Image: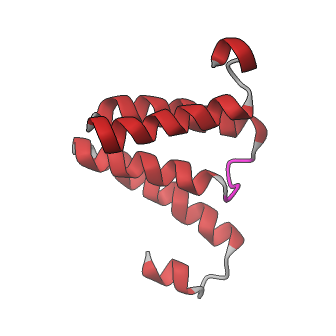
Amino acid sequence: FTSVLGPSHPNTGVMYNSMGQLYADQAGDAAKAVECFTKGLEIKRLTMSESHPSLLTSYQNLTEQYEKLGDYTKVIELRQKKLDIRVTYLDEHHATLEAL
């Protein structure tokens, strides 16, 4: 798909995310899922700010895989990024933030 759309096309990022889901859910390969989710995230970041709410799903996907891999330093880093985005876009007393 990268040969048709190019390596940084938004739909290429969507395909990387879809592949990441397959590796995570069907193949049980968290390391390969991280690789795909990371590529998808990198493509999203080309067209969005670091605090864009659309990045939340990508960070969540990566968080879940790093938890499976036992890399809790990375899990904490990603959860902080998610929190920073949510605080930027939601009131600090919003129920979503309280659940974190």
Answer with the quarter of the image where residue 13 lies: top right
Q: With 1 as the anchor, is 74 left or right in this view?
A: left
Residue at image position (67%, 59%) is 53
Residue at image position (68%, 11%) is 3
Residue 30 image position (x, y, % from top left): 30, 37
Q: Is residue 86 above or below residue 4?
A: below
Residue 98 image position (x, y, % from top left): 48, 83
In depth, the one of 2 and 95 nearer the eye is: 2
In depth, the one of 4 and 78 nearer the eye is: 4
Report the predominant secondary structure element of the magenta stretch. loop
Residue at image position (55%, 29%) is 39
Is 18 part of what is drawn in magenta?
Answer: no
Quadrant location of the C terminus in the rendered image: bottom left
In depth, the one of 11 and 95 nearer the eye is: 11
Q: Residue furthest left?
A: 70
Instruction: Specify start and end residues of the magenta stretch as a single range.
Output: 49-53
Quadrant location of the N terminus in the rendered image: top right
Q: With 72 as the anchor, is 35 left or right in this view?
A: right
Residue 69 image position (x, y, % from top left): 24, 41
Counting the numbered discs, the total is: 0
Is 51 part of what is drawn in magenta?
Answer: yes
Residue 12 image position (x, y, % from top left): 65, 28
Residue at image position (70%, 33%) is 11
Q: Residue furthest front?
A: 26
Q: Tell me, what colour scheme is on the image?
A: secondary structure
Q: Is residue 97 above or below residue 63?
A: below
